[in-house]
């Protein structure tokens, strides 16, 4: 399918997991999607695979913490319809062993990286543009990864701040907060820890990346122009205090 510049969306973290599922869903919704990831070869291969199935997708290698590389990736894309900031890092580490470096790296990618991409995207958007952050249910609190919890709480704050600042422009800013999801990042846990985490979900199993992507698609829909500054929990009801059935 030939590339179109009429309805372009960018998705960071687009090489795998939730990011890749979002790339697919937005392309199915008619966007021309630029998938961005610091794993240049992986994101290029993923984009080519989707393009081979008839979807309008391109891949670009870039590091969200490096503004120059993001600007380069966006070269030639001067009018964006949507931006989804899904790039993130996360790993388990208990409170008494987490270090300042753990915090610096996690906040740099999850918060500063999201800010850089969103700021560059908004400069290339007109009224009707959509910015979606991927936060996490962990933003409400959690044990075993204070650096990640803090970063995702900051993403929620950033969502609300940008939504207020951009109200007059017609650009909507929202966030999706996934619950425990089956991704390469969570599969890096030990099989035992993964199973324990999944068992705590209301259904006894993790979400799939595509389920999270469908929630993101609500916010990128042009008909949701009156929704901004909101955080949608896509967690099977666990944020309500639900327990496994």
Image (spheres, grey):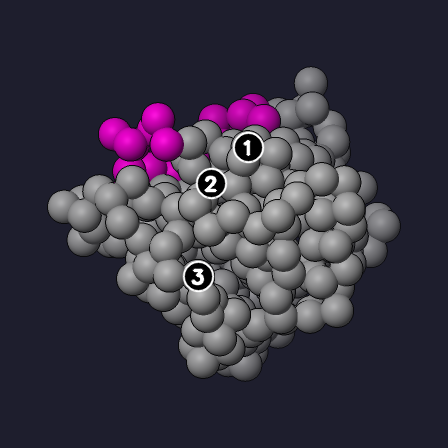
Element carrying mark 2: strand
Mark 1 closeness class: few <14, some 14–19, many ≥20 residues within 10 Å: few
Ranked by sequence position, the earlier of labels 3 and 1 is 1
Specify the segment rendered in magenta. Answer: 222-242
- The structure residue drawn at horizontal position 77% and vertical position 60%, both measured from the top left corner, is 45
* Residue 176 numbered mark, or none: 2
Q: Look at discs 3 and 1 and give the one toward the viewer.
A: 3
Q: Residue at x 50, y 37 (%)?
A: 216
Which of the labelled discs sits on residue 29, or is there none?
1
Report the disc number at residue 79.
none
Nearest to the observer: residue 17 or residue 53: 53
- Pointer 2 or 1: first along the chain: 1
Task: Say if the magenta span includes residue 241.
Answer: yes
The N terminus: image quadrant: top right
Considering only vertical position in the picture, is 95 above or below 162?
below
Quarter assignment of residue 48: bottom right
Q: Are marks 3 and 2 in contact (CB under 8 Å)?
A: no
């Amino acid at each position: 399918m030939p590339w179109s510049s009429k309805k372009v969306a960018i998705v960071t973290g687009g090489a795998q997991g939730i990011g890749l599922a979002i790339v697919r869903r937005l392309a199915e919704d008619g966007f021309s999607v630029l998938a961005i990831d610091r794993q240049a070869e992986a994101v290029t291969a993923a984009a080519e695979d989707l393009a081979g199935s008839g979807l309008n997708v391109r891949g670009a290698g870039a590091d969200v913490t490096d503004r120059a590389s993001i600007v380069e990736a966006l070269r030639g894309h001067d009018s964006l319809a949507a931006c989804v900031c899904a790039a993130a890092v996360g790993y388990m580490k208990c409170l008494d062993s987490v270090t300042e470096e753990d915090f610096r790296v996690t906040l740099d990618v999850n918060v500063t990286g999201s800010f850089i991409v969103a700021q560059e995207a908004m400069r290339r958007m007109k009224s009707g543009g959509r910015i979606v952050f991927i936060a996490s249910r962990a933003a409400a609190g959690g044990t075993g990864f204070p650096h990640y919890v803090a970063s995702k709480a900051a993403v929620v704050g950033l969502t609300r701040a940008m939504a207020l600042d951009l109200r007059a422009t017609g650009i909507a800013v929202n966030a999706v907060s996934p619950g425990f999801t089956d991704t390469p990042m969570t599969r890096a846990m030990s099989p035992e820890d993964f199973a324990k985490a999944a068992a705590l979900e209301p259904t006894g199993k993790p979400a799939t990346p595509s389920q999270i992507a469908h929630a993101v698609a609500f916010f990128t829909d042009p008909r949701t122009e009156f929704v901004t500054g909101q955080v949608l929990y896509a967690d099977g009801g666990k944020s309500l205090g639900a327990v496994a059935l």
